[in-house]
Image (spheres, rainbow, N blue to C red):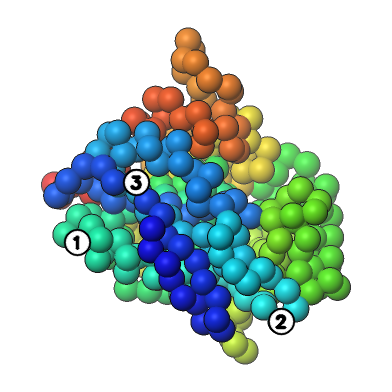
Amino acid sequence: MTDLDLPGGGHTSVIGVDGGGPGDPVVILLPALGVAAGYYGPFAAALAAQGVAVLSADFPGQGVSRPLASRKHDFGYAAVSDVVVAATVAVAQERRAGRPLAFLGHSFGGQVALVHLATHSSPVSALVLIGSGSPYWRGFPNRLKLLVQTQTLGAVARVRGHWPGDRVGFGGRQPRQLMREWARFARRGDLAVERGAVVGEPDFSGVALPVLAITLDNDDLAPQGSVDNLADKLTGSRVEHRFVTRPAGEDGPAFDHFTWVRHPGSFADDVATWLRSAVTPG
């Protein structure tokens, strides 16, 4: 475990599972909204068993990271990308020097991965998106319901000074700015990041690397239309789409937005195989 100091007196920790050796991939796993990095332990262990090392950090205010979101502690996509993701990449380069790096973003973590790759000169050479889509309302079966829900969430965060997801059961406790950006993303379809007085969507067309975009069976939070709307922003990348379900006869619950993490089965093997091929020259 590596402790990281964050601007403003905050802190978080990078945890990991070692696996493989020189030349084998190292995955930087970016969690979903409100999900602690430690939750991904079973999936990380399954990747490590296939020779893929994993590192992950709690996003600000999630897991062991402190302080929690509040009126005084407010931030958006840019801070998560520029501070926590950048620091985790630096830890990966130091602890796993010389090994190829890849992002694996779950849900919100995939959105942050896109922002980071579009706004930083990154050593990351591949990207896996798992259940990671755009919240844009037109990508969901129940469009108007989704639009109302996302805009209500943004309004609550604006009034309270944070989103109380830890109390209502969705997304964890989140800062006002992040929820404002997310609600706008859901309303307009563009991931407009706020950097001071400048607000705009990064140039995702400049991201050029192999991408695996996975839609999960029974995933109401990131259905196919949502995943497509996010992956379609990567016009400069080679994107492979897959729909993943639990293989017939394999033990474990049916896949949905979260069950693959705790009961990965052969899914982890498939991801590891793709990662190895994606980061291997030639």
The amino acid type of the residue labelled 2 equals Lys
User: Residue 18: image x %, image y %?
Assistant: 29, 46
The amino acid type of the residue labelled 1 equals Ala
Cβ atoms under marks 1 and 3 closer than 8 Å: no
The amino acid type of the residue labelled 3 equals Val
- Residue occupying image coordinates x 52% and y 59%: 58
Element assignment for label 3: strand
Element assignment for label 2: loop
Element assignment for label 1: loop
Which of the two marks, 1 or 3, is nearer to us in this view? Answer: 3
* Residue 23 as seen in the image, left or right of residue 67: left
User: Residue 194: image x %, image y %?
Assistant: 60, 79
Mark 2 highlights which residue? Answer: 72
Decide which of 263, 236 is in the foreground and name it: 263
- Residue occupying image coordinates x 43% and y 71%: 4
Mark 3 highlights which residue? Answer: 17
* Residue 168 as seen in the image, left or right of residue 206: right
* Residue 98 as seen in the image, left or right of residue 205: left
- Residue occupying image coordinates x 61% and y 65%: 61
Q: Residue furthest top?
A: 249
